[in-house]
Image (spheres, helix red, strand yellow):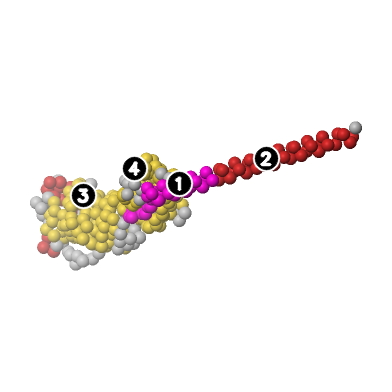
């Protein structure tokens, strides 16, 4: 019995092995076919790219502008030049941006559906950013008003290109930006050129302290002046001067008013040769980062009044500052 059963077992083993080899050979043939298909598609893709002229777009940061800056915020515009070498327009799907300083995030965001780059053309894509100083100072307490901080802008442009699919074009640009601080102002003294009840001509001796780490080029200033809580008016003056960084500058500011229009209280105050004052206004300055309009103000100050000798005064210290 045992001798007659052995061939059946051997025959079954051979059949199973033969079936397994056929399946392996079939899998090999299938795998080879898939690889051939992949190679064919790749070759076709390359030939289409060569024939039609598809290529990867390029991008570069062509400029950074600060069109507006004041004590509250800085408006920044990043110009990105994108070139499309393809024969059809390509959509600019998203723009991701990040501004950081010394590795700390200042601002980030996303601009969706940013437009289309024309076929065989180039477009300057403008990315507007709004940097609010209070947000920075409340988060990073070591960033002080008046300082200059380094920044790095990172931009990812996401485009959709035939043949290549969705691509991300990463860009970076570094620079510096200021955290402006308004200048301090004091009226050192008021010197009267012509002193009368009908019309008084005076010169305000202003002391301006620039607390910024950069120079201010003064172009003009406008102001209003209160003497003893009486508004005697103001003016706008074009005045060129350089306010040195972290320095003090002195400016003469002429003013004319009619004391009789403000009653006897102001006249008595002027004759008393001393008064309290308040002053508010703005200065227009040029900086290395663009032009700025900065407020100036002084509340509850006190100053000396100086009159010419012919008006009964003593101007021995006329040139003191």
Q: Earlier in the sequence, mark 1 or mark 4?
A: 1
Label 3 and label 2: CA atoms lie apart by 100 Å
* Element at label 1: helix
Q: Earlier in the sequence, mark 2 or mark 4?
A: 2
Q: Residues within 10 Å of mark 3 (few under 14, many from 20)?
A: some
Label 1 and label 4: CA atoms lie apart by 30 Å
Residue at 44% from the left image edge and 49% from the top image edge: 46
Q: Residue under label 2, please give it.
A: 22
Label 2 and label 4: CA atoms lie apart by 56 Å
Magenta range is 36-64
Give the numbered dot on residue 224. Answer: 3
Q: Nearer the viewer, mark 3 or mark 2?
A: 2
Q: Residue furthest top?
A: 1
Q: Earlier in the sequence, mark 3 or mark 4?
A: 4
Give the numbered dot on residue 106. Answer: none
Q: Position of residue 271 (x, y in %)?
A: 17, 55
* Element at label 4: strand
Q: Nearer the viewer, mark 3 or mark 4?
A: 4
Question: Disc 3 vs disc 1: Cβ atoms closer than 8 Å?
Answer: no
Give the numbered dot on residue 115. Answer: 4
Residue 272 in the magenta stretch? The answer is no
Q: Nearer the viewer, mark 2 or mark 4?
A: 2
Q: Residues within 10 Å of mark 4 (few under 14, many from 20)?
A: some
């Amino acid at each position: 019995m045992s001798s007659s059963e052995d061939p059946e077992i051997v025959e079954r083993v051979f059949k199973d092995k033969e079936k397994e080899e056929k399946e392996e050979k079939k899998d090999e043939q299938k795998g080879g076919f898939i690889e051939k298909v992949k190679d064919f598609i790749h070759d076709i893709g390359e030939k289409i790219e060569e024939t039609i002229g598809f290529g990867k777009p390029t991008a570069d940061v062509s400029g950074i502008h600060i069109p507006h800056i004041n004590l509250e915020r800085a408006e920044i515009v990043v110009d990105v030049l994108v070139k499309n070498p393809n024969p059809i327009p390509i959509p600019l799907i998203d723009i991701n941006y990040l501004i950081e300083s010394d590795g700390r995030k200042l601002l980030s965001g996303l601009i969706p559906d940013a437009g289309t780059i024309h076929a065989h053309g180039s477009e300057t894509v403008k990315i507007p950013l709004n940097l609010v100083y209070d947000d920075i100072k409340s988060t990073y307490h070591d960033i002080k008003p008046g300082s200059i901080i380094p920044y790095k802008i990172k931009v990812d442009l996401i485009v959709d290109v035939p043949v290549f699919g969705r691509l991300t074009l990463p860009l970076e640009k570094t620079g510096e930006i200021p955290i402006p601080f308004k200048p301090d102002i004091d009226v050192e003294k008021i010197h009267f050129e012509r002193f009368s009840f009908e019309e008084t001509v005076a010169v305000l001796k202003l002391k301006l302290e620039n607390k910024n780490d950069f120079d201010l080029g003064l172009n003009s200033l406008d102001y209003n002046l209160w003497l003893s809580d009486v508004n005697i008016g103001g003016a706008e003056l074009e005045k060129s001067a350089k306010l040195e960084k972290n320095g003090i500058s002195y400016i003469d500011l002429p003013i004319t008013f009619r004391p009789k229009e403000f009653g006897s209280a102001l006249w008595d105050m002027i004759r008393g040769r001393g008064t309290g004052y308040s002053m508010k206004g703005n200065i227009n300055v040029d900086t290395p980062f663009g032009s700025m309009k900065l407020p100036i103000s002084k509340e509850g100050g006190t100053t000396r009044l100086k009159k010419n000798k012919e008006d009964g005064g003593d101007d021995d210290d006329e040139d003191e500052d």
